[in-house]
Amino acid sequence: MASDCDVAVIGAGAAGVAASVVAARSGCRVTLIDVGDRPGGQYYRGADLSPSPRAGVDYPALAGDLDRLVAAHAVDYRPRTTAYALERAGQRLLVRTRGDDRHRQDVDIIGAGTVILATGAFDRPLPFPGWTLPGVMTGGGAQSLVKGQHVLPGRRIVVAGTGPFLLAVAATLLEHGAEVAAVVEANDPVVGSVRQLRGLTSGLGKAGDLGRFIAALARHRVPYLRRHRIVEALGEDRVTGVRIARVDADWHPIPGTERVLECDAVSVGFGFVAQLDLAAQLGARMIRGADGGLAVEVDDDQATSVPGLLAAGETTGIGGVEAARVEGLVAGATAAVLSDHASALTPSALERVRRQVARWRRFAAGLHATFPVRDGWVDSVREDSLVCRCEEVPVSRVREAVALGARDARTVKLLSRAGMGWCQGRMCAAAVDGLCGFDDIASLQGASYRPVSVPVPLGALAAEPVEG
Ligand SMILES: Cc1cc2nc3c(=O)[nH]c(=O)nc-3n(C[C@H](O)[C@H](O)[C@H](O)COP(=O)(O)OP(=O)(O)OC[C@H]3O[C@@H](n4cnc5c(N)ncnc54)[C@H](O)[C@@H]3O)c2cc1C
């Protein structure tokens, strides 16, 4: 059945929950759509949170508010639902949805005056020899396995890549009883953080988390190897170890410094990539975020270049959970005004929230500058390493496409098949981007355009409701 609302929010992570609560408290009819079983997104994962004494400000308070608004039918919350297409119909936007994998036939078209995209991000892996061996997984994958399924990826695990997320993953693994053989960090955060002191002090609220992670590593005597990188994952049928090397400031391995760490699982992470499918469908303007990845461009009201389309959280650039939450609050307030409702956030409260957005974005920029992805991985990656694991495309085939004259991401995809498989480039796009070195944002955006963002059965499409 086709349905209608003032504000459709796609994604129930910190950003989407905050946006829904503010819009609904302002009197808007809100529909909140999320793939997951429970609200919370990647960070909270539907955790049972103790109620917060601070009304409506932090995430636990917002989550409690959301429960009450759903119970009062002020928010039509649709879990286990994927928004697979977004399109314009006159003044309104239409969100096409389907149920989860067991209920793909359950489809709907939701008409909305305003849509808030809060679809978050996914992991950014980079290829190295052996990265497709069973037992090698992304940091986010390891987190989901442990936090979501209560399953450890292995007994002795190497955590590698770059960024503070490595510490979060290592701490989670330790907390659940795994042995962490080492945290292998390609950058030098000691030097980097001194240079980025101003930006990093904007996020002093996160110092508690950092202290907890470092204490866990110290308690378990886990080596933290700065300026080191995995050059190869070893093993026949599954990973049995990794060869690591010291690297220079550009991540080129330094000859003679290689050694092997034995392990039965590896968790790698080089940051995150914003989910842009739905924004690309409407042609929303994109920018390069502080980490160099593509992100939806927004103004101070979280409005994109497309009328009626707002965005908040990681979709607008990787900024962490606190930036996502405060951007969500702003987006909810903007949606209220666009729907001719008085915002539930007073002008002074909104001003305070905007200052927090600026603060958390400064912090994120400081982190990205401390933990950049350096070009050395491009120079030292082996030609036969798979870059697109779905279509089994080696690095050499991507380079051949460029040598043949491909000058944009879409042509590389057509010539090499990288990005044409099941995941539709979600896993390899950042790596292909790095290998090709294209600068043109429009061409990269073109490559992320898909009219339908997830598989939808033809029968379900045929059964779609007639809108209106
Ligand atoms: C895999 C992973 C693990 C992470 N683990 C940590 C961690 O341990 N510690 C930490 O500090 N940070 C972690 N982060 C980063 C942190 O989760 C984010 O900073 C934060 O969650 C951002 O909030 P958000 O609301 O922007 O996005 P998210 O929390 O990612 O929420 C986005 C929501 O949108 C939903 N969604 C996406 N596309 C659609 C669609 N088409 N239709 C319907 N719903 C959709 C998703 O299912 C998700 O629930 C992790 C990130 C990822 C990707």
Image: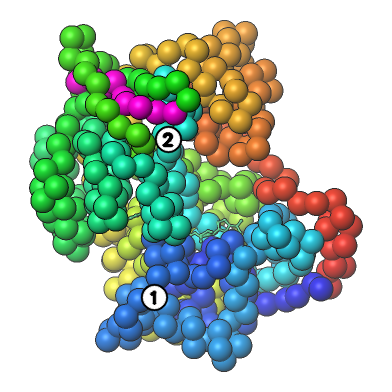
Lateral position of residue 28 relative to residue 451, left or right: left
Q: Is residue 179 above or below residue 79?
A: above
In depth, the one of 38 and 182 nearer the eye is 182
The type of residue carrying mark 2 is: Gly
Indicate whether 4 appears above or below 298. below
Q: Name the image quarter holding the C terminus.
A: bottom right
Res 301 → quadrant: bottom left
> Is-magenta flag for residue 245?
yes
Q: Amino acid at mark 1?
A: Asp
Q: Which residue is mark 2?
A: 135
Specify whether residue 270 is in view. no
- Residue 61, picture quadrant: bottom left
Front label number (1 vs 2): 2
Q: Earlier in the sequence, mark 1 or mark 2?
A: 1
| Residue picked out by circle 1 | 48
Give the x, y percent position of residue 55: 32, 86
Q: On the rendered structure, is 17 left or right of 357?
A: right
Quadrant for residue 349, please give it.
Answer: bottom left
> Which secondary structure class fits the magenta region best?
strand
Q: Which residues are magenta?
A: 238-246
CA gap, disc 1 and disc 2: 30 Å
Closer-to-camera residue (347/27)? 27
